[in-house]
Image (spheres, rainbow, N blue to C red):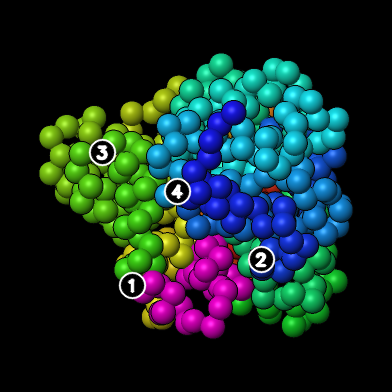
Amino acid sequence: MPIYNVDFTKGINAENPWWFTKESLDVPAFTRSDYDHYVEEFSEAKINVLLGPRRCGKTTIIKQLINNLLLVQKIDPKRILFMSLDRPFLELQPQKLPAIINYYEEKILGHSIQDSKELIYLFVDEAHYDLLWSRVFKQYADQNLPIYAIISGSSASSIYQGQESAAGRFHIHQMVTMKFRDVVRWNNPEKQEKIKEISKKLRGALLNSIKNKNPSEYVRSLSIFSTLSNSELDLIKKSLEEYLLKGGYPEFYSGSKSWKENSRHYQTDVFDVILQKDVVTISNLRQPPKVRTLLVLIAQNTAKMLTREKIRESLGFQSAITVDQYVDALAEAFLIRTSVKYKPGGYPSTKPKKYYAGDNGLRNSILSLDGSNLSAEERGALLETAVFNHCLRLQFHVDRTLRTEGKFWEDETEKDIILDFVENFGVALPVEVKNGHGGQEDIKATKIVVNKLGSPFGIIICNDQMGLTENKILLLPAWAFLLSC
């Protein structure tokens, strides 16, 4: 029988207070849209892998789900285990997760998980601190044990290590920073359910229009905005300006601190911790200061083209291969995104990439921006960054494929983004982002790309224009499109 040291025992018990008290966890009342998806699955055995950047809210949503199990589902507290594998008291354990589960089975559950006749709920946060997690949960999946699990991590590359043999057994989920619709809900708590339903209907109609190669259903769905009051529409539009500045990190919205105070906190206390834990250490990079410099360079140039040679020269790297290694490490930690020239047939492009910040708020915090006196070019870059990131999330919603890279169009005319649904629906759509009015020249240029791609329609993101032109170019305010993703 194993002997557990005092620190180990106290640490695990402290992480799971519901074993000893009926008090609920102290978590925010506001729940992101992702929350509903997991609650709907509580009754089925399933192993979920939840990937997303540090401080985006993964631990919060896990604890909110635990509260739901305890207070709404009335699950026996002893059937719920939570553990964050980055806790210092676990450092002396050579096999962290197996030791935790052994303790849980022996001291709390009273029998092995294999002998359980009811669902056991296992929540493992920061799982990449013990790569044995994959082997443990693969065995559970192979044995069809009654387990509902969520395993979270802040780096896609680290948590995927050792998963090759577990392909198909785990359900992959992506949880990055808050979508625009959740920020609108945050700003309007009395009508957050209404906003959520509007967003879901818009997304469903947009995807159906893409799938059916006919924009009519989505165009009809836009009439839902005519049912909103002027004050509701004004709130959505004001939320867009806030979102362009603050992005989607929950801490930029919670509490009584100003944007300036929260931004300074991220610069001084958070930024380097994220880089060290989720980029430098995990990817074993030899020049940590250059990781910081590279992220600042990309933040400054979000939505712009950068060549590998330009990055290499700016950072003093010896080779383009090193550039790729550092760029990939930042992307795997969800801090940046890249975009390559779209080539039908899926062949990789060797042309320069466009680079995007993974979140506007982190980007603006890094650069000490307060949102005042933005130039048209700067606002346009922030707008395109938000739209690009939402496009990747829309694609993930369809095929559950994690992406660090998107597509753009370039020949005699450039379109900012290609929504690539070729594998799913046989369709690719050009999306142009304008910080202003979508004029006739923009419509004409987008139509050229629509014809070349054989797209059913194209999209121009603009200010307050909304409608379908006679040549099937959809003009949309940014706030309407972001609510549709």
Residue underneath mark 4? 89
Q: Is residue 257 above or below residue 46?
A: below
Residue at label 2? 27
Disc 3 versus disc 1: nearer the observer: 3
Helix, strand or loop under label 3: loop
Assess whether mark 1 and mark 3 are in contact (beta carbons under 8 angstroms).
Answer: no
The range drawn in magenta is 239-265
Q: Are marks 4 and 2 in contact (CB under 8 Å)?
A: no
Q: What residue type is labelled 2?
A: Val
Crowd tier of the residue under label 2, counting other residues whose Cα lies within 10 Å: few below 14, some 14–19, many 20 or above: some
Residue type at mark 1? Ser
Mark sitting earlier along the chain (3/1) = 3
Q: Which of 252 and 379 is in front in this view?
A: 252
Among numbered discs 4 and 2, the one appearing first in the sequence: 2
N-term-proximal mark, 2 vs 1: 2
Give the CA separation, mark 4 to mark 3: 26 Å
Marks 2/3: CA–CA distance: 35 Å
